């Protein structure tokens, strides 16, 4: 069964530091997403990426966040200057046909900002 | 932001009993999906329903999509301890994202 792979599984960083979360989506998928889940809260949409550009982003995804697909296989989320409230599980997902038929999620990166 | 309301928030039942989880919105979905999430893991897709009135069965799980495509239900027959987990509904409202409900935590006691 094809998988979405995320690294690292855990990341602890100091407030104000930059972090890069990495994802390898399923190889023939065209739509890529980042979601986050603060402990005990719902899964929240951050950004969707299609055809090498951002297709939609939420109000959470401000200027501190950016995404890249640098080499045709990796999909990264960068947070430039982390805040305590960025602590959450970050999930990457990919889809072959967009949101209508569902996503495959990775296992997530637990980001802790101290 | 499109809101999906899930109910109940928590459900605890005895092995062998049936349960139903509901997902409602004031908006019309393009599709509605149900996921299951284990602690510390990403959501895993169980089913997608697209057509109003659609019913899908996956072993002991039955998923129904409302005629108006604004609501859905997940019914588990003869629940087993292995069904314990967080069940999430998610709605596709446009071309580029899913919006998730807050989830229903199901506990099946042996």
Image (spheres, rainbow, N blue to C red):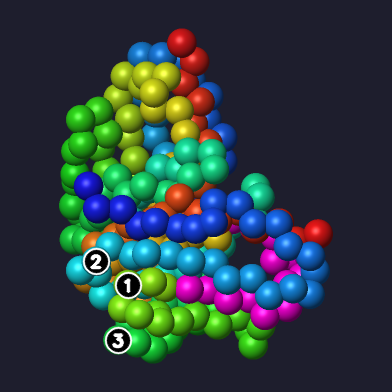
| SS state under label 2 | loop
- The chain letter under disc 1 is A
Sequence-wise, the earlier of marks 2 and 3 is 2
In three-dimensional space, the C-alpha distance between marks 3 and 1, rounded to whole angstroms, equals 13 Å
| SS state under label 3 | loop
Q: Is disc 1 in the same subunit as disc 2? A: yes
> Is residue A24 or residue B31 the one in the foreground?
A24
Categorize mark 3 by other alpha carbons within 10 Å: few (<14), some (14-19), many (20+): few
**Is residue A88 located in the magenta-colored stretch of the structure?**
yes
Q: Is residue A4 visible?
A: yes
Q: Looking at this rendering, what residue extends furthest in the top direction?
A: B110
Q: Position of residue B34 (x, y in %)?
A: 35, 49
- The chain letter under disc 3 is A
In the displayed structure, would residue A87 be above or below residue B107? below
Disc number for residue B40: none
> Is residue A22 or residue B22 the one in the foreground?
A22
> Is residue B74 or residue A30 the one in the foreground?
A30
> Quadrant of the rendered structure where residue A98 is?
bottom left
| Segment tinted magenta in the rendering | A76-89
Q: Is residue B8 visible?
A: no
Categorize mark 1 by other alpha carbons within 10 Å: few (<14), some (14-19), many (20+): few
Left or right: B95 as drawn, with respect to A56:
left
Q: Residue at point 37% right, 19% down?
A: B80
Q: Is disc 2 in the same subunit as disc 3? A: yes
Left or right: B106 as drawn, with respect to A99:
right
Categorize mark 2 by other alpha carbons within 10 Å: few (<14), some (14-19), many (20+): some
Residue indicated by mark 2? A27
């Amino acid at each position: 069964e094809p998988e979405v792979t995320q690294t690292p599984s855990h990341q602890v960083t100091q407030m104000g530091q930059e972090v890069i979360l990495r994802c390898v989506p399923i190889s023939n998928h065209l739509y890529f997403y980042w979601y986050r889940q603060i402990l005990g809260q719902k899964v929240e949409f951050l950004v969707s990426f299609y055809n090498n550009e951002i297709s939609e982003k939420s109000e959470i995804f401000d200027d501190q966040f950016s995404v890249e697909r640098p080499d045709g296989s990796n999909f990264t989320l960068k947070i430039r200057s982390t805040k305590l409230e960025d602590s959450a599980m970050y999930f990457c997902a990919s889809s072959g046909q967009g949101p209508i038929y569902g996503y495959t999620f990775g296992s997530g990166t637990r980001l802790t900002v101290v | 932001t499109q809101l999906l309301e899930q109910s109940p928030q928590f459900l605890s039942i005895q092995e062998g009993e049936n349960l139903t989880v509901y997902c409602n919105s004031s908006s019309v979905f393009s599709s509605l999906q149900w996921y299951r999430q284990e602690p510390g893991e990403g959501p895993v897709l169980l089913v997608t329903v697209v057509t109003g009135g659609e019913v899908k069965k996956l072993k002991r799980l039955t998923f129904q999509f409302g005629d108006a495509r604004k609501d859905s239900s997940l019914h588990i027959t003869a629940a087993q301890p292995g069904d314990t987990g967080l069940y999430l509904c998610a709605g596709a409202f446009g071309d580029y994202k899913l919006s998730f409900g807050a989830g229903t935590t199901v506990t099946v006691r042996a």
